[in-house]
Amino acid sequence: VHLSKIDKENKNPLSGAEFSVYAWSKSANEFVPYKGTKSSVTGAEEMMKLVEESDGQHVTPAWLYYAPDNEGKFRIVETKAPEGYVIASEVFDVVISNSGESGFETQEFYLEVENGITEVNFIKTDLHTGKHIPGVHLQILEKESGNIVTDWISDGTAKCIQGLKLSGDEEQVYIFREIKPADGYVSAKDMEFKLVQDKGQSGGQDSYYVLVNDGGEWKTVKEGLIEMKDDV
């Protein structure tokens, strides 16, 4: 199986995605991990994952074989998206025909998988009136590294930031910080947030969740909009 990973909008190749292979099990009546490769360390069979040979170009590292139990049905699932992108919602099924008495037969499959970029919106408002406040110096930074992702001066509208990383095996927490408030206002406290997307054998979801740390409890914000409020 050959698979190309591309940006949903500009169609440019994307690096860093991961894909796992499942096989149908007639006896279990579901797709199960396809253990078609062996660990280079232990020698034990492990779940097959596609190998990225070049920028955005992935292939299965070994043959997929027809068997009576799998009926030639295989499923490829994206388990990790490139940084700043959303895991593809689709699953990709391929069916290998039974060569029967004709013996071994090679079949190749070519797939193209698109990823959409993450987006989070930020607004700065008055605590009492709810009106947008212009002229505030704001910043997004990574909590662990302290690296600044971006900063801007509010203009009275929501600011859309693209390409923030999803939390996965490693949690990715960001900080929304006010550097300098508008005249007459008091600086607000930092706000911690992260992006989370469910995933599994059935594939990812187009939607993902933006969670804000509220006193130690992670709460989902509506429509991916983070609001920081200033008091006078």
Image: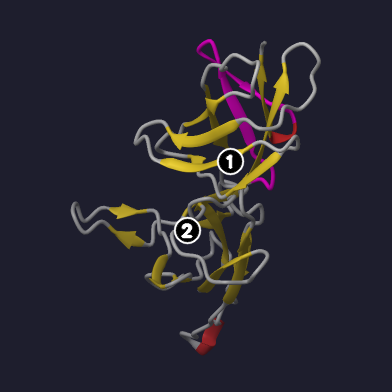
Q: Which residues are magenta?
A: 205-222
Amino acid type at image mark 1: Trp
Circle 1 SS class: strand
Disc nearest the viewer among 2 and 1 = 1
Residue 17: image tag: 2
Q: Which quarter of the image is occupied by the C terminus?
A: top right
Residue 153 found in image quarter: top right
Q: Position of residue 195 (x, y in %)?
A: 56, 36
Nearer the observer, 197 or 118: 118
User: What residue is disc 1 on?
Assistant: 152
Q: Is residue 47 left or right of residue 175?
A: left
Amino acid type at image mark 2: Ala
Q: Is residue 177 left or right of residue 145?
A: right
Q: Residue furthest front?
A: 183
Residue appearing at x 59%, y 23% in the figure? 181
Circle 2 SS class: loop
Examine the rendered structure and indicate whether residue 215 appears above or below residue 211. Answer: above
Give the mark count: 2
Nearer the observer, 124 or 71: 124
Residue appearing at x 43%, y 40% in the figure? 148
Examine the rendered structure and indicate whether residue 43 appears above or below residue 183. Answer: below
